[in-house]
Amino acid sequence: MDCREFESYIPAFIDKKLDFGTMEEFRRHYETCEDCREELSIQFLVSVGIQHLDNDDDDFNLEQELKKRLVSNEKQLERHRIFKESQRYIVTLGCILLGLLLIWHLG
Ligand SMILES: [Zn+2]
């Protein structure tokens, strides 16, 4: 992902609409690119900050909110990875069982 792509994905990130693959690339670019980190902070501040202007929560901290969102995405990614892993594992196990069953029947 390059800077231009990153920028184009910012609104989707704010709306929590990024799919897992994109989110992983998005995060990777975020961690390596200073400019985009800044850009994301600004856009996040503007769009999420405006939503919170109407509310009376003085405790609201955008900086923390952004971090929280990135971390929660990380947890989601982790869960997704584990899910994918176990899927692969189950498929492999199924193939082995099927193979054994065939050998047992044919033998
Ligand atoms: Zn960048």
Image: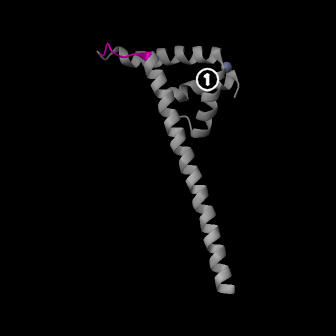
Residue situated in front as seen by the camera: 66 or 42: 66
Q: Quadrant of residue 53?
A: top left
In this orientation, which residue lies closer to the viewer: 73 or 1?
Answer: 73
Q: Residues within 10 Å of mark 1 (few under 14, many from 20)?
A: many
| Ligand 1 positioned in quadrant | top right
State the image quarter where residue 93 is shown.
bottom right
The residue indicated by pointer 1 is 30
The three-letter amino acid code for the residue at tag 1 is: Tyr
Q: Is residue 103 magenta?
A: no
Residue at image position (53%, 28%) is 13
Residue at the farthest left position: 56
Q: Residue 81 vs residue 62: left or right?
A: right
**What residue appears at the point 53 percent right and 13 percent down from the top-left corner?**
42
State whether residue 9 is above or below residue 91: above
Residue 29, placed above or below residue 59: below
In this rendering, position of residue 72 left or right of residue 84: left
Residue at image coords 53%, 40%: 78
Secondary structure mostly taken by the magenta-highlighted segment of the chain: loop
* Whole-percent x, y for residue 105 in the image: 65, 85
Instruction: Check the picture and name the quadrant holding the C terminus.
Output: bottom right
User: What stretch of residues is rendered in magenta?
Assistant: 57-62
Question: Is 75 positioned to the left or the right of 32 in the image?
Answer: left
Q: Residue 84 placed where, x, y %?
A: 58, 50
Whether residue 34 is visible to the viewer of this picture, yes or no, is yes
Q: Position of residue 16 (x, y in %)?
A: 49, 32
Using the rendered image of the protein, determine whether residue 7 is visible from the camera's viewpoint.
Answer: no
